[in-house]
Image (cartoon, rainbow, N blue to C red):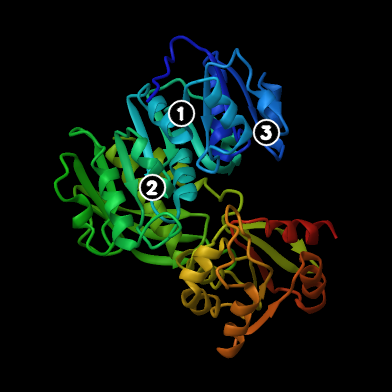
Amino acid sequence: MYHIDFDHPCHVYFIGIGGISMSGLAQILLSRGFKVSGSDTTLTDLTDRLAAQGARINGSQIASNITSDIDLVVYTAAVHEDNAEMKEALARKIPRLSRAELLGLLMKNYEIPIAVSGTHGKTTTTSMLAHILLSCETDPTISVGGVLKAIDGNIRIGSSEYFLMEACEYTNSFLHFMPKVAIILNIDEDHLDFFKDLADIRHSFHRFAELLPADGTLVINGEIPYYKAITQGLDCRVVTFGRDKSNDYYADDLNFNDAEGGASYTLHHEGMDPVRVKIAVTGEHNVMNSLAAIATALELGLPAGAALDGLASFNGTTRRFEHKGDVNGIMIIDDYAHHPTEISASLAAARYVDCGDVWCVFQPHTYTRTKALFNEFVEVLSAADHVILPDIYAARETDTLGVSSKLLADALKAKGVDAYYFDSFEKIENFVLENCRKNDMLITMGAGNVVKIADDLLRA
């Protein structure tokens, strides 16, 4: 693998520079004096920001973009060798690194690299911990998989030893990382277009935990089934969190604010007086996310008061149960949930908010996931009062595998759920405006472009 010398900046070209993680890495390199250029088929606020900072951005991916002055090409997992720019880089024998490989090498430049992993909740927990690190005045470098108001984007360039980032398991990307502190929030069956099964996924998380050095720390959800199989044989310190008293950090006396759904609970840890914790976001899943964040902060030796203040100041990130606004008295929420566990958590969280009926516009993400977890989707979506389904967001896939949103809607109807399928966003928007009532909640949900419905409704 090519090893980049961060003390001698060079010209780095990013294929897929507009991605939330890639744009963050590009911004970090720009701050270190590197010449940065790249391409993406869709130009966004993130690419505009990079261009304003001096990066050269191409709106198409063609061979002529790869010029002789490029020293290194960085690419995402979605870029394959038939990509025109990738083929040209290969022909020119330009060194290449995947996004994950570059991030792993970058981590070596910090004394305390913190990696947040788990099938669900990575962006929220990273954002919570970002608020804590900022409140504790640690001046961290932060890379988060969403837009966080506290840092006015998805990246913050700090000057301290702290580097906080997300660690995604897809294609085993996180096995290229070099964390000193790692969080494992949960382990669930997902990304079955890459992993064989749950056992394969658990094996990858065990390998990720093994990356920690002997003086490192693993903060893990003690309620992951058979979690000790993940921590077996580790040299590092292992700290657990959860709702059960057997965990090193645990929460009880849980309450939710009826109006807005924010949570509060009592935090317990041996050698520490019980303390009341308040968070502004709703749902039991966010209680667990906050437990992971505060446990990590305390293990880092950060002051408890400032850490709790930072956690309390967090009020969400984009696309994570985000209150986008109101239309005709209808509360519009947007959520990134695209796995049955995430959907269940988000719909349960909705019940903590004082509202009328809950309408869920769910856009399934990838044919592989929809087919593999079809029955689970039917079960969890049944928790909504009304379900509306647009077509499946194919993402990187082309084979439909014989599955469709209409089949999902039919299965929901057979279960007695008030479910609908529409073949266009426009039809969904018209149906919603005609049928949702004042005080109802409408959630646009999924990892694709379903948020466009929420945005269109708010512009109407």
Q: Residue at x 40, y 48 (%)?
A: 169
Q: Earlier in the sequence, mark 2 or mark 1?
A: 1
Residue topped by disc 3 = 61
Helix, strand or loop under label 3: loop
The circle drawn on residue 385 is none
Residue 304 visible in the current orientation:
no
x and y, in percent, of residue 42 in the image = 71, 40
Residue 217 visible in the current orientation:
yes
Residue topped by disc 2 = 117
Helix, strand or loop under label 2: strand
Q: Are dots 2 and 1 in contact, CB under 8 Å?
A: no
* Left or right: 59, with 232 as reference point: right
x and y, in percent, of residue 358 in the image = 63, 75
x and y, in percent, of residue 251 in the image = 32, 60
Amino acid tagged 3: Gln
Distance Cα–Cα, label 1 vs label 3: 18 Å
Image quarter where the N terminus lies is top left
Amino acid tagged 1: Leu
Q: Nearer the viewer, mark 2 or mark 3?
A: 3
Distance Cα–Cα, label 2 vs label 3: 31 Å
* Left or right: 2, with 438 as reference point: left
Helix, strand or loop under label 1: strand
Quarter occupied by residue 103: top left
